[in-house]
Every structure is written in C-alpha cells, then in structure tokens.
Amino acid sequence: MTDERLIEVSDLVFSYPDGTLALRNISLDIYANQFIAFIGQNGSGKTTIAKCLNGLLKPNSGYVKIDNLDTREKGATKKIVTKVGYVFQNPDHQLFNNTIYKEIAYGPRNIGLDEKEVDERVREAANVCGVEESIFQEHPFFLTKGLRQRVSIASILAMRPRTIIVDEPTTGQDLRQSFEVMNFLRNLWEKEGHTIIIITHEMPIVAQYTQRVVALAKGNVLLDGTTREVFAQPELLAQTFVKPPQITRLAQALSKYGIPKDILTVQEMYDAFVIAQGKTSS
Amino acid sequence: MIAVSTQDLGWKYAGRNNFAIEHVNLEIEENTFTSIVGPNEHGKTTLVSCIKGLIPNSFNGVWRGKVEIFGKDTREISAQTLANEIGFVFADPEAQFTSMTVEEELVFGLENIGLPLNEIKDRLEWVTNITLVSDLLDKPPYEISGGQKQRVAIASVLAMKPRIIILDEPTSMLDPLGKDFIFDILTNLKKEQDLTIIVIEHNIEQVAPLSDQIILMYKGNIAKMAPPATFFEDSEFLYEQGINPPMATTFLDQLKRNKLYDGGLPVNLDDAIRAAESLLKPNGYRKGTS
Amino acid sequence: MFLGAVSLFILVPEINVVLIILILLFLIWAKVDISGLRIYLPLTVTVAIFMFAISTAFPGPKPEYHPFKVLGITFYLEVFYFTFASYWRLMAMLFGTIQYFSTNRERDTLVAIRTLKVPFVVTYFFSLALRSAGMFLEDMHTIREAERARGLDESAMSLSDRAKLYGMYMIPLFTLAIRRTDEISNALYARGYTPSGKIEGGGKRSDYILTQYPIRVVDIVLIVLMIGIFILAGFLQIRYGYFSMEHSPLYQFLLSRFS
C-alpha cells in the first residue's frame, strides 16, 4: 500500500429519499494501488457506500473527496468519471451504443477529447480487456455475457480512472469465468497500478485475490483491515451474516492444535497442518 | 421406482451448429437428491429443460432420444400435466414473480390446473407453513428481498404438489443469508417430503452434502455421475472440467495423496473437521506410528 | 375517480375548481404525500401555455365576439373563456386520475376487474402489464444511474439533448425487456399456464383471491351513488346544457363588463 490517498470519506451519512438510513457516520480512506473487497449482507450499505465513492449518491452530511474534489460540487460528475469508474453488475444496464467501438469511445468523447485521443484510448482499453479490434463494429447485444462484461469494463477503462469499482464481478459465473475476470482485475491492480474495489458475496474469491476487506453491517463499518485480519474474526463477521471461506473455518475449528486462524488457501492449510502434526507426534 | 430416465437424449438449438447435449443417458431414482454441476453453457440447463418439457415446447431445434417421467414418455404428456408432475424454479427471482402479491403468485399455478376453491385454500396453508412465507402473503414483489422471492417461487411450485422438482441455480443471485435460507428449505424438503429433487448449482460446497448423487456436465455430455463420497476423487480431472471440490475436501485429498491420510473424502465441514482432528490428536491413530 | 369522470360533462369552471379542491382534500385525508404531486406542476403549466397560445393564435373570430387588448395582442373573450373552462375541466379529470392511482393498490384494481367477470386472460394480461411496468421503472432507475457513472451529467445538458437522452435509454431498456420476456414466458409455462387460460379437461377456473374480497352493502351503495351521479350529470348537460359555459357566473360577469 502506498501512502497516496485517492478518496477520503469523512463522517458520511446517507439516507435514501424514502427515509431509510443507509450509512451512519462512515469514515474511511482509499489509497492508491489497493485491491479491496466490500462485503456484508444485502442492506448493510456496501453498495451505497460504493456509489458515494464515485459521486452517484451525494452525502446528506459529511463528505466524500476524490483527489480533494468534493463530490457535491457543481460539475463534479464529469471530473469524477476520470478518477473513479463504476462497472455495474449487469452490463445490459450500461451498454447503449450500437457498435462496440462507439461504446468504448462514448466516455472519452463525452469529456471532450479530440478524435485522435479518443481512438488511442479505445484501442488501449480494448487491448487490456481482451476485446479484439475485429469486433469493433459488432452490436453489443449479440455478444456472450463474458464479452459484454469486458466491453463494459473497457468503456470505463477508456476514461483512465485510477480507482475502479466493480459490482459483483463473479456472481452467476462458473469457475473458469470467475478466474478470468478476477485475474484480469488483478492484472489491472498489479501491472497497471489501479485501485480495485469489488463488491461481492463470494468469500473464496475475496480470500484469493484481495488484500484489504471492508465489512459493513447496518450502515456501519464493522471491520476494515487486511484480508487475513478480517477473516480471522468470524464472530464479528457473523453480525453481517458473512462466513469466512470453508478452509478458513476448518482452520479455525482446529486452532487449538496450533493451526493459525487466518488461513486463506488449501496450500496454507496443508503446510500448517503438517507442522501441527509434527508437533503433536513429538 | 425410476423417477426420471433419459435415453440417448440430444438437443440442438436452431441456428447453432453443435448439439448442446448429446447421447445423455441417466436414471434418477425417486425421492433422491441429485445435483448437476459443470461450467456454464455446457448443457446443464438444456438437460433439465428437456426433462421439464420446456424443450421442445418453447424452443426450436432438433430433438434426439427420449425422456421418461415415471415410465411415461414426456412428449406424450400435456404441458399442464407436466407442470403438475415436475416443478421448476429459475435463477432469477424477479422474472419468476409474475403477479402483484405473494398470495396471488402462490395461487396462480393452482388455478391453472383447475383445482376447486377449498383445495386451493388447503394447499396454500400447507405450503406457506413449509416455506415460512405466511407473513409475506399480501406483499407486492417490490417490497420483498431476492431471497424471499425465491422462497415464494419454491412455494408456488411446491403448492402444485409435483413429484419432481427442478431448481436451476436457485441461489446464484442471492446474498449469503438468502443462500442459506434456500439450502435450509432444500434440506427440509429432502427430509420431510416425498420429492425427487434435481438442483443445478455452482455452489458445490453447500449442495454436495445434500446430494445422493452428483452429475457433471461437460461439453454436452455426462462426464461423471457418482455419489459425493466418490465423486470428488481425482480432483485434477474435476478441475480440468471446470469445477472445484469444496475446499475442505480438496485439503483432505491433498493429505491423501501425500499419504498422510487414508480415510474417505468428506464433503461437509463437520466431517472434515472430525477427520482432521483424528489425525491431530496426540493419541489418535496415524499411519506409520508404532 | 368518479369525481374526475363527472368533469367530462362539466364546463362551468367554478364547479371544476371546486371538484379539484375536493379531490385534494380527499388525498390529504387518505394521507397521500401532496408534495409528490409537484412533479405534475410542469405538466399543468405547459398545457396551460399551449392551450392559450393556440386559441389566441387561431381564434376564428365571430362578429358577436367581444375583443379586448392586452399588451397589444387582441384576445376574444368567448374564445379565451372557453379555453379557460376547458383547461379546468382537463385539470379536474387529470386530478381524478392521479387520485385514483395514488390511493389504490394494484391488487385492488385487479380484484375490481375480476369482480366484473372479465375473461381471465384479460385480467392476467393487465396484471402482467402492471408487474412489467414496475420492473420497467426499476430498470429505468438503474440505467440512469449506470449512465451517470459513465459521465453523463443530466443537469448540465440542454433540453434538446435531454430529449435525445430518453431515446438512448430505450436501447438498454429494450435489451432488458427482451431478455426478460423469455424468462417470464418460461416461468408461466412452468406453472402450467396456457395462453388461452383454459383448463385441461374443461373445468371452470376457480378464483381464489376473489373469495377474500366479498362485496359489502357499503360497496354496493357507493357504486350505485357514483353511477347515478355520473348519469345525472351527463343527462343534465346533454339534454339541458345545465353545465355549459353560459351558466358560469364568472362568465356572465365578464360579459356584462364588456358590453
């Protein structure tokens, strides 16, 4: 983690128009080059806080500052979009142009870049996302779900935001598809230096890919720490109906034999087990 | 008695070049719990749609082979009788909810099959008790959560008292709490009702402990069909076919390969804990000790 | 609702204004959030401007019309007043409709239709339409959010661009709707529903929900009353012109000032 703070959230309170209090005095910071997961049951506020982070929702009190730009400032929307991108869960909600090229080009054109720059960005984003130039003139409607998701991400990437929020990247996908998306996001984090925030219910994915986890419950931040720290506290996590990955729970059930409580993978479990068994046989 | 059997079943969607499923032969005993796993677009939904009759009813394409429900060929049974015998729950809680209140939704299927009023009333009571939706009855769809909508979906299907119920990824769009709820209901259904249950799921960890047998669909064929105790042997093969055993099972499998464990492969957490503990207790049996 | 329907026959603006006030009072009594009606304000203003502009531009003056001048433009009293009266009639009908939809749950509407013993297919179609409208609105909301996340700033756009925007929203909406139709029709099929709504074996379709809504005496009295007033108003207007413009006191007053 570097020390550069990208987004500052201070004392954020948010209620929906119908009166539901969704976020209660939340303060947290998002730094450069982090891979973060927001977890918690439905209604805990994880999606709400994510939408506050890119200015989609504006605080009732407190503030969200992106690179020192307050999200409530007039005209902030166009500026925010080059700093924080938000990929919706269902790509169909975001795709509305009739060719893939135009879809990816929409964002850059909207902020007034010249055509040459737009073209450069489209090709760059498409390349990173594995969207081949040969399909640039195709209509998004007929693509497979995986490809639509990638076009969706590419259209956000073309704005070159430093922070990218992805809502449920692996829900409903099989193993291979999940790995593809997550490996792709990990690449964006490691090689391209983005901060990635995923909102998800899938704990094995969180365990395998993320380095920081923010768990929310009833509009408050319940836990905010490294992935290991957070999963090592199952009693607290239970408040938001989240269970650590199965292997972590196995480790925690065997902790009295010396197995650490923050195991995240099968390999770690195996190694710890061998050590523990060595101890008990002596 | 055999509830479902297919013989050389095949289906090719119109406009596609390849068969979505081919040469599928299986038998499912009545009152058992079968789960179907495998990568997306490899034939799981196609298979159950053929069993249910959605294919060929709502789709164009080429049909091969035969499906029999309790000995009768499905192509010789009408849609309404089939709805009576086989219930179907879809993945998307929104699209499944077609009425404006929960009560209407539950009663819809019953009215369709022409039941008289007093029978409808009885069934309504029975099904709301099993699925715990009694406090949701007069609510419209926009006031209840995804998990609750799925419960209503299961209830509305159960109300028709089918002998077979098929669920296509019932939990994929739900949060962990919703998922747990659904698996709880499935556990209850397995224990207390005379039902043949078939579930397509990606969440192998939660569905394997409930299953009497697991079917792996890969590239339109049945790649493996076995009870959970033996299904997860050879995790390399499974991984290649795009599925992962539950983490605890994989761990014990790794111990086994390294000759540190020689028991069976458990598929639920409690059994895995017990197996691991037996190896860690200072005076427990371990291979190689004197 | 019937208050609004009765306005069909009433051209005396004073009565229509009174009806509107009655409807508003009724809404307040029914605890409907009045501030929610604010969204209709632009509509009422636009319609007023439109109507008056047209009638002023194309008055079709007759010799007996009384002209008057304001800011150099010639208005004709009869034409002006007719527009005025029609406007209030329209508003009364509009408010009646708003009142109906604000105070009735969809379920009640459906039960009402079923009580009329309309064929099941029709009521089911209506019910499905309502449900789809609900899903449509939710989707609309999500799509607007998704587009804002792509940098679309609605408040910074001109009116014509905003109009084009709605055309743009149609694409994702249609995509979603098309994908959903498949799912919905599968769901219907799985519940044994056939397009004709008929039951195999030719039985009669029971209507369970209806059994929860028996008709009470109060209901029948109100229905008779409402139909009665509607017919009476219609009769009086059509046969005797009881509610036409000439009977408006304000109109008579203005006429006397001009002649």
Image (tube, rainbow, N blue to C red):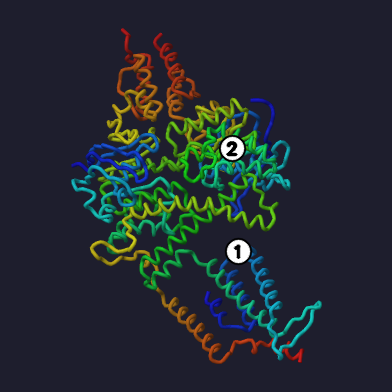
Contact (Cβ within 8 Å) of mark 2 with mark 1: no
C228 relative position to B250: left or right = right
Query: The N terminus of chain B appears in which quarter of the rendering?
Result: top left
Is residue C250 at least partly visible in the picture?
Answer: no
Say what amino acid the circle numbered 2 marks: Ile
Say what amino acid the circle numbered 1 marks: Asp
Output the chain of dot 2. A
Output the chain of dot 1. C
For label 1, the SS is: loop
Q: Residue B234: which quarter of the image?
A: top left
Query: The C terminus of chain B appears in which quarter of the rendering?
Result: top left
The one of A145 and B233 positioned closer to us in this rendering: A145
Work out how far the residue at label 2 is from the one at label 1, CA to CA, in angstroms: 36 Å
Residue A43 in picture, x, y percent from top left: 53, 45
Residue tagged 1? C33
Classify 10 Å Cα crowding around label 1: few (below 14), some (14-19), many (20 and above): few
The one of B146 and C73 positioned closer to us in this rendering: C73
A60 relative position to C144: left or right = right
The one of A124 and A281 positioned closer to us in this rendering: A124
Residue B89 in picture, x, y percent from top left: 36, 47
Q: Is residue B273 above or below residue C52?
A: above
Residue A50 in picture, x, y percent from top left: 60, 40
Q: Is residue A176 above or below residue C46?
A: above
Task: Say which residue appears at 64% left-offset and 77% top-offset.
Answer: C87
Residue tagged 2? A165
Q: Mark 2 against mark 1, which lies toward the viewer? A: 2
Q: Residue A185: which quarter of the image?
A: top right
| Furthest-right residue in this view | C71
Q: Residue C82: which quarter of the image?
A: bottom right
